[in-house]
Amino acid sequence: MYRSRPSGNLDNRALSYLSSITEDSDLFYYDLLGSQAHVIMLYESNILSKKETVEILKGIDQLLTNSNTLNEYADTYAEDIHEMVESALIKMTTMDIGGKMHTARSRNDQVVLDIRMKLRDDLNRISLNLLDLINSLLAKAEEHIDTIMPLYTHLQQAQLGVFSHYLLSYCFSLLRNFERFSESYKRINISPLGACAIGGSSMNIDRDKVASMLGFSDIVYNSVDATSSRDFLVEFSSNALNTMLDLCRISEDFIIWSTSEFGFVSLDDHFSSSSSAMPQKKNPDPLELIRGKTASTEGNLIAITSILKGLPSGYSRDLQEIKPLLWKTSSTLETSIEMMKEIVSTIHVDQNKMYLASVNSYAVALDIAEQLIKNGGISFRLSHKVIGTIVDYASRLGNVPLSSLTLSDITVALKKIDFSHEVITSEMILNLIKQNTPENSIRFRKTKGSPNKNEQKAMIAHIEKMVIDCKKDLDNRLNKLHLAKDLLDKKIKQLIDEGHNT
Ligand code: ARG
């Protein structure tokens, strides 16, 4: 709208086509904070007088306390929130004063400043949510250290495990996502302001000062990089997608396990949908939506990188298209984590169904094959063959459990592969089968990270410690931001008070 070269106003259709006002509502607050710091820096660099600074700060204050003020004062030709705010302040303070606010600044550094400030707040809230979800997985896991269930590969029963083992696996993977977000935070939390349009300014501004007033740990040094690069938000979107993929896999598991055929778990009624037609239905819609929203998050990442792929260096208006995608990714992730947390803490677990599936399962076959190696000194390959043959025999008998095979069943089965061995007899195999109850199957597996009780307890302790460390890091980040905000507020108050007294 500040049209010094083009004549006349922008065509109305062009204006509404160009406008980013809708998606900019999420940036309004950050735009004002950025302007507060910028204006104070201009004052401290002797570019603005105290009177001008105070007038602008008072105007910003008014916009912050009553957002209707914006619509009241802003120019209707504004293309985005930056122009809206500036035009409102000019109207509130006169062109001679408000017109100085944009000194040594461009919308190009301003927009990416606002995005970075919003994103770091989103990231911190998401990180807190992630820790809440991890804590609810931990709490459920502690209840289910002894809840035996089959573990699946290819969705076929693979080995026996316990429900806590499953839940803890997601604590680890969500903690890695927490770490990814924390790692990326340092690349988000740097200030582009002062890079101006692309090549810096001849005004005597202090980029580091604005950065520290806004709680940034540093500046984006190079002005071309500061205005052109969006790698930080690609990283954020990719971390968001990784996290959604975790939630999506949990969702898929719970959806399958809550079918009548499995019946391992059932969602709490408060998190289940019904059918408008079939009275009996209790549907896992929230989980299905997490799955669906994961696809949208993936789409957003692809759309964002596709926009970036076509661009030269320096600001291009295409970049504006990224904002709504990014906001969507961020809010989807935040609400999906919350939803999953509630679902996990309220889910009902049918231990009997899980046990029944385990006791009738061939998922002890690998345990027996390993014990055959230990007892009889044969190769794993041969042992695999022997036990596989016995399982095949049992399944042909009508899927009977291994524990109901008789000595002669085993002898007949082994004849099929002409197996005879002086130590490994049918009796020994039968004995091993009897020994490998579901409980023993789990107890016998001692490797680090396996489902036995000691390992469950060790993993829980390990995760608890990690959660405490993560929370400390997060609190540290939040403290730094609060400290900077308090200092900025104090500075503003002091300037406004001094303005009143002169
Ligand atoms: N509305 C724009 C965006 O969201 C702000 C930057 C516009 N800069 C410009 N030179 N046209 O990206």
Image: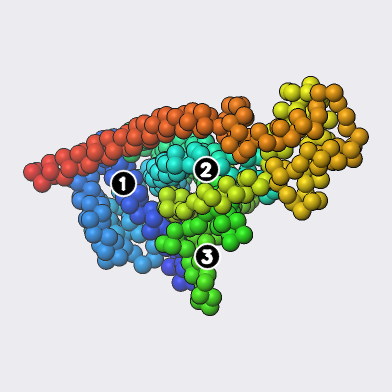
What type is the residue that disc 3 sits on?
Answer: Asn
Tell me what residue is drawn at x 61 percent, y 39 percent.
438
Residue underneath mark 2: 147
Instruction: Please give the label number shown on residue 283.
Output: 3
Q: Is residue 205 visible?
A: no
Please give left or right for residue 219 compared with residue 303 in the image: left
Tell me what residue is drawn at x 38 percent, y 58 percent.
25
Please give left or right for residue 436 compared with residue 377 in the image: left
Cα separation, mark 2 vs mark 3, equals 25 Å
Between tags 1 and 3, which lies in front?
3
Identify the element where label 2 is drawn: loop
Residue in the foreground of this view, choosing between 448 and 52: 448
Residue in the foreground of this view, choosing between 501 and 371: 371
Identify the element where label 3 is drawn: loop
What type is the residue that disc 1 sits on?
Answer: Leu
Residue in the foreground of this view, choosing between 304 and 240: 240
Q: Position of residue 330 (x, y in %)?
A: 47, 51
Cα separation, mark 1 vs mark 3, equals 45 Å
Cα separation, mark 1 vs mark 2, equals 52 Å
Q: Position of residue 308 (x, y in %)?
A: 59, 49
Residue in the foreground of this view, choosing between 20 and 170: 170
Packing grade of label 3 (10 A; few <14, some 14-19, many >=20) is some
Specify which label sits upstream in the sequence, 2 or 3: 2
In the rendered structure, are the residues bearing label 2 and label 3 in contact, judged by CB atoms less than 8 Å apart? no
